[in-house]
Image (cartoon, rainbow, N blue to C red):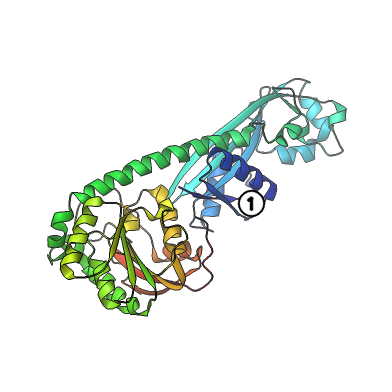
């Protein structure tokens, strides 16, 4: 995973989080989603963060985080909770002083909610301290941050301005960063496993493709992809990219439809690439093959007039790689170029191959929203909402700006 959006209208909070997370995980790109999230009123900290996630997920399909902070005292364990801002204004200095004694223990607690394609994780961070009612700490309006003395002896508002201080929010972000790093390791291992699995099927794949009863021909999925390749391939210019080429049939169809294209076909499965090269040599076509993952940055800033992928690759990926895969595919699609691929809409349709792993499902609306993040507009699709697989073609109509 390389991309996470921070859903907050607070620019300073976003910048602090971006700097902190980038220092922990240099490969992680943090972008702001400047959305106003309602001040949810509840005495349940868990419920507040869940409702914030639900609110934001209606506005974006990208992976995002939201946060919330609360305070808890030793004298009144559930107080003030998430109501600190309200109570600061209503109680004021004298009200707080009547409820608490100098030196009473207090905790500042932050929670991060991280949403990624249907899955939500939560991360907590907290710091301890004590209350102080030193009048020199007040400047008119009572702010709890100005009256909490952290365990290392600093006023919380001062400590929060220190970029080296591991405050409650940064502690939660640290847990998030550790989880993302661990997930990336697991995803890389998973992709290696998937590559080995597909390599083992390389020598039988041609037979499966040619078998009308095979699951790969259910709903004429491959045929529908081939139709769009033949339609848009001749319109493309310059270089072409095939992602997850397998034994290379889709690439050969593209090269035949437009012999002027310089085609690079890629896959992570070495066995599939070897079989693709063998079959392409038999067909007498000139296609370059490379074993690589397009999300790795190995293609640099290279742009292609058409990018194709057949075999619902995005639906096989670990969830942490979905957004990066689509971003990379869009990034490498040149201005006015075409991005053509298929994806699973509904795994429950048809009694076909039992999945080895759970597959990623997307609606057409979700895919449109995802690709719109990268200035891609759908210009064609073959299928209906009640089919297992949808085949789509997008065009990059604007400047191809992106972050790799």
Asked whether residue 217 appears in the rendered view, the answer is: no
- Give above or below for 118 relative to 98: below
Asked whether residue 54 appears in the rendered view, the answer is: yes
Residue bearing the label numbered 1 = 38
Please tell me which residue lies in front, 218 or 72.
218
- Give above or below for 89 relative to 277: above
Please tell me which residue lies in front, 203 or 123.
203
Q: Tag 1, which secondary structure? A: loop
Q: Where on the picture, by quarter, is residue 105?
A: top right
* Left or right side of 383 for 143: right
Please tell me which residue lies in front, 364 or 171.
171
The crowd level at tag 1 (other Cα within 10 Å; few <14, some 14-19, many 20+) is few
Q: Where is residue 111 in the image (x, y as percent from the top left)?
A: 57, 38
| Residue shown at 79% from the left, 24% from the top | 132
Q: Position of residue 345 (x, y in %)?
A: 33, 61
Q: Where is residue 89 in the image (x, y as percent from the top left)?
A: 79, 40
| Residue shown at 81% from the left, 26% from the top | 97
* Left or right side of 197 for 62: right
């Amino acid at each position: 995973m390389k991309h996470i959006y921070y859903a907050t209208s607070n620019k300073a909070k976003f910048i602090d989080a971006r700097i902190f997370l980038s220092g922990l995980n240099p490969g992680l790109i943090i972008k702001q989603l400047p959305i106003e999230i309602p001040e949810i009123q509840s005495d349940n900290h868990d419920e507040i963060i869940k409702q914030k996630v639900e609110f934001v997920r209606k506005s974006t399909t990208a992976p995002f985080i939201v946060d919330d902070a609360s305070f808890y005292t030793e004298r009144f364990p559930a107080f003030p909770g998430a109501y600190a801002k309200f109570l600061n204004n209503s109680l004021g200095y004298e009200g707080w002083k009547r409820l608490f004694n100098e030196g009473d223990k207090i905790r500042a607690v932050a929670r991060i909610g991280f949403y990624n394609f249907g899955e939500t994780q939560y991360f907590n961070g907290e710091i301890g301290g004590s209350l102080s009612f030193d009048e020199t700490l007040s400047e008119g309006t009572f702010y709890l941050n100005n009256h909490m003395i952290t365990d290392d002896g600093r006023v919380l508002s001062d400590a929060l301005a220190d970029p080296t201080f591991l405050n409650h929010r940064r502690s939660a972000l640290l847990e998030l960063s550790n989880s993302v790093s661990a997930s990336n390791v697991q995803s890389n291992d998973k992709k290696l496993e998937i590559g080995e699995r597909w390599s083992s099927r390389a020598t039988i794949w041609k037979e499966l493709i040619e078998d009308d009863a095979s699951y790969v021909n259910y709903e004429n999925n491959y045929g529908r992809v081939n139709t769009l390749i033949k339609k848009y391939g001749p319109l493309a210019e310059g270089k072409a990219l095939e992602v997850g080429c397998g034994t290379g049939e889709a690439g050969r169809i593209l090269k035949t439809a437009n012999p002027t294209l310089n085609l690079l076909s890629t896959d992570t499965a070495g066995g599939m690439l070897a079989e693709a090269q063998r079959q392409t040599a038999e067909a007498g076509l000139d296609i370059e093959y490379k074993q690589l993952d397009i999300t790795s940055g190995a293609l640099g800033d290279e742009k292609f007039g058409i990018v194709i992928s057949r075999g619902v690759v995005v639906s096989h990926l670990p969830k942490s790689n979905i957004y990066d895969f689509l971003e990379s595919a869009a990034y490498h699609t040149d201005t006015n170029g075409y991005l053509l691929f298929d994806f699973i809409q509904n795994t429950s349709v048809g009694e076909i191959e039992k999945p080895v792993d759970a597959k990623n499902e997307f609606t057409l609306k979700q895919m449109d929203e995802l690709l719109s993040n990268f200035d891609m507009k759908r210009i064609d699709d073959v299928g209906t909402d009640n089919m297992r697989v949808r085949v789509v073609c997008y065009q990059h109509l604007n400047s191809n700006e992106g972050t790799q």
